[in-house]
Amino acid sequence: MSTDNNYENMQTVFWTEYLRILKGLKEPVDKERWHMAPYETNAYYSITDNEIVFLAGLLQSPLYSKTFPDSYNYGALGSMVGHEITHGFDEEGRLFDQDGAFRDWWDKEDMKKFKAHSECFVEQYSNFRDTRVNKNVSGINTLDENIADNGGLEASYYAYKKLTREKGAGPKLPGLGFTHDQLFFLGFAQVHCEKSTKQSLLIDILFDEHSPDRFRAAPLMPQQTSTLEACSWVPILQAGGLGKVRVNCFPKAIATWHGRESNPRLPDLESDALTAPPRCPLYV
């Protein structure tokens, strides 16, 4: 490695990794080997291993802590666990069985229902336009991730409700006035808080299999029936001036959906003129 030539260093790193991969083609598959470094802030689902992996960089504040309320942990980390599990049943995951073997194990009726729900998601997300770069999200390119976002949030909310029935909700956070249901969805939105340049955002919309974060958080709030039934967002919207709450995860459309079209304390987000998306039920 050189101390004054980063380009050559990167070439060496990539070439070494390439040789390691080639060597692995002649060796038995090591199913214990992780596909990412433990310190990364990430998680993944492996189709061939049929497993989900959450790395150490992710399992810490502000996304998770054993001192946080269960409601927040289930909304933040729990929805990510559900997200990765749902990948086992998306357009690609459905083609691999429980042993990671390539096999289409769904019957025709399952496939028919899945296609119908998929088309709904494609249409919904394709209508989301980010006015900062004047580009629409590709509902086709982001389909698997959108399915995982929706399925993960729904599954985590059901799991949290099951937990509260068994052990109770626990004490609320002092000083904020949020219910536990509100903390659940606030935790989910916190995962998708971001600040990006227009250039970075444009690249993401054109090439990333994930929808931009603003469209991963806000649209799912009315999308999940449980949100409207269990959660009044007025206190969160009124707390828009609190930087720690990061209400700016939510486009103004959230306020409109809940009868709060104008709120002077809600940050100006240059948000899009979104209308409430059609409901895309995950389960029949």
Image (cartoon, rainbow, N blue to C red):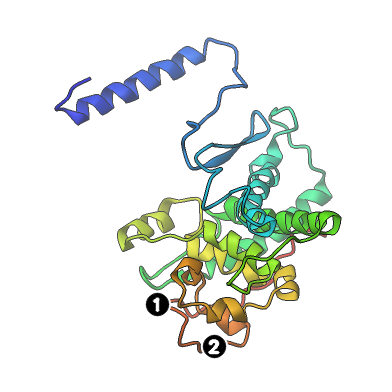
Q: Going 81% across and 47% down the picture, which residue do you hit?
A: 108
Relative to residue 45, is residue 169 depicted above or below? below
Relative to residue 254, is residue 148 depicted above or below? above
Cα separation, mark 2 vs mark 1, equals 14 Å
Q: Residues within 10 Å of mark 2 (few under 14, many from 20)?
A: few
**Nearest the eye: 33 or 76:** 76
At mark 2, the secondary structure is loop
Relative to residue 19, is residue 198 depicted above or below? below
Which residue matches tag 2?
A: 261
Locate the C terminus by quadrant.
Answer: bottom right
Which residue matches tag 1?
A: 270
Query: CB of mark 2 within 8 Å of CB of mark 1?
Result: no
Q: Quadrant of residue 125?
A: bottom right
At mark 1, the secondary structure is loop
Q: Amino acid at mark 1?
A: Glu
Pinpoint residue 23: horizontal percent, then vertical percent.
46, 12
Q: Amino acid at mark 2?
A: Glu
